Image (tube, rainbow, N blue to C red):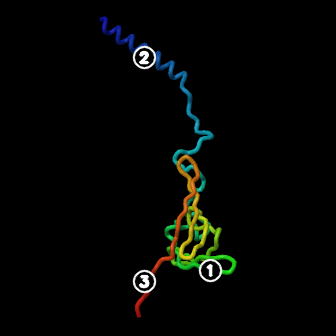
Amino acid sequence: MMRIISISLASLVATSLLAESKSEMSIYSPNGKRDPFQGPSSAARDISSVGSPLEKYTLDQFELKAILKGPRSNQILVQDPTGASHILTEGATLGRGNATISRILDTEVIFTERRYNYLGTESIAEKVLSISKEPASEK
């Protein structure tokens, strides 16, 4: 008989503790908080909503074909994966990450790309595209 009383007394104490903790619990509200399944910035866009053909592909998918030297400014000729060619100057953006053309050198182009980590902290990365060396065809 003693055992049954002690078990029911323990369950009574546990039930009262559970009732106290429920009254002190707060309810989570997602209002004003970012979605944890979305990126920290609105820079991530759907590919179908891209406006320019230069924004459809990543920077690595473009191929630098030529560097055009001019009296006022230099330009570059890039080719996208579909084979279309585009002429760009310094300051223009290219690729999904909106990489900006920082410098046009003799044989390569330096791009600056702003990136955001999962906390939303911005970092700047430089990428270099060089002119592809194709072997000369023999005749």
The relative height of residue 74 versus residue 34 in the rendered view (above or below) is: below
Task: State how far apart marks 2 and 3 are (Cα).
Answer: 80 Å
> Counting other residues with Cα less than 10 Å from the Cα at mark 1, is it few (<14), some (14-19), or many (20 or more)?
few
Name the side, left or right, on which 20 lies relative to 92. left
The picture places residue 95, in percent across and down from the top left corner, at 56, 66
Reading the image, the residue beneath label 1 is: 69
- Mark 3 and mark 2 in contact (Cβ < 8 Å)? no
Q: Amino acid at mark 1?
A: Lys
The picture places residue 12, in percent across and down from the top left corner, at 42, 13
- For residue 135, the mark is 3
Q: Amino acid at mark 2?
A: Ala
| Disc nearest the viewer among 2 and 3 | 3
Q: Amino acid at mark 3?
A: Pro
Query: Residue 1 appears in which quarter of the rendering?
Result: top left
Relative to the observer, which residue lies in front, 116 or 71? 71
Reading the image, the residue beneath label 2 is: 14
Identify the residue at horizontal 57%, vertical 57% (top origin): 124
Query: Residue 99 appears in which quarter of the rendering?
Result: bottom right
Q: Earlier in the sequence, mark 2 or mark 3?
A: 2
Q: Earlier in the sequence, mark 2 or mark 1?
A: 2
Task: State how far apart marks 1 and 3 are (Cα).
Answer: 23 Å
- Disc 1 on helix, strand or loop? loop
- For residue 123, the mark is none
